[in-house]
Amino acid sequence: MTIFSPTQFKTLVFDCDGVILNSNRVKTEAFRQAALPYGAPAAQALVDYHVARGGISRFEKFRHFLNVIAPELAPATIGPGNDELLATYADAVENGLMACEIAPGLAELRAATPGIPWMIVSGGAQNELRDIFARRDIAQYFDGGIFGSPDSKDKILAREIASGHLQRPALFIGDSRYDHEAATVAGLDFLFVSRWSEFHAWQAYSTEHGFPAIESLHILADAG
């Protein structure tokens, strides 16, 4: 399947985890550690729920954990509440995001797309993303804005399109089923990045829905 040329678009939209940063495993392990006070089975159930719903915010996942998973798998356990779970998770994620690999080819792709706005639309916490990107000296690449939860990707994309900040044709570059679904609803083309994805069924899903996939962003930079 032919790979898109990035220069054919008016806006490039990127997911963060698994696309810009090698951070999927960081967040998966952070969910596990936060939930361990409820026992290993409950923690693993949260991990499974998280992996199956890549791109959905931590707020929704911890709500599901407390409302569904913990009552079912650890009904007699008195563990941390929502705020404490979120704080434990955030501490673990901050350390991991500062240390994980940045996508190879990112600078080259930015240089190959002058004048095309770049935008982050992530399930990660917006304030956290902006802080990490600034500290890792990549915030300047995303001149179209860095956006994340608590707003959903669907809400962010709809808002930015309505405001005129996200101009179409646009390409959403992601690594999860939800990224593809959000791109489709918003009327954006979609490109899947496989190298760090935790979506294990992506090949069959890509074939079914007819979108291209690349291993890493350096391939898209070369296609420019």
Image (spheres, rainbow, N blue to C red):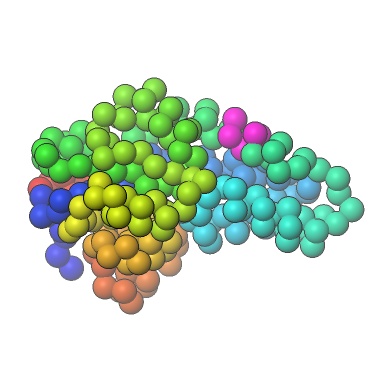
Where's residue 206, x and y in %?
A: 32, 69
Residue furthest toward the front?
163
Q: Compare residues 200 and 138 and report the one nearer the observer.
A: 138
Asked if one can make out residue 212 in the rendered structure from this viewpoint, the answer is yes
Residue 59 in the figure: left or right of residue 67? left
Instruction: Where is residue 129? Give x, y as percent.
Output: 43, 35
In the rendered view, would you say 200 is above or below 141? below
Query: Which residue appears at 52% of the width and 30% of the height?
Result: 94
Q: Is residue 143 above or below residue 194?
A: above
* 2 shown above or below 116: below
Q: Which residues are magenta?
A: 87-91
Q: Main secondary structure of the magenta part?
A: helix
- Nearer-the-camera pick, 28 or 143: 143
- x then y, percent, for residue 221: 16, 44
Report the residue at 42% width, 29% height from top: 132
**Residue at 47%, 53% in the rendered image:** 152
As for residue 89 lying within the magenta part, the answer is: yes
Q: Is 161 situated left or right of 73 in this image?
A: left
Q: Residue at x 53, y 43 (%)?
A: 27
- Residue 195 visible in the snapshot: no
Residue 172 colored in magenta in the image: no
Residue 76 percent across, percent down from the top left: 89, 53
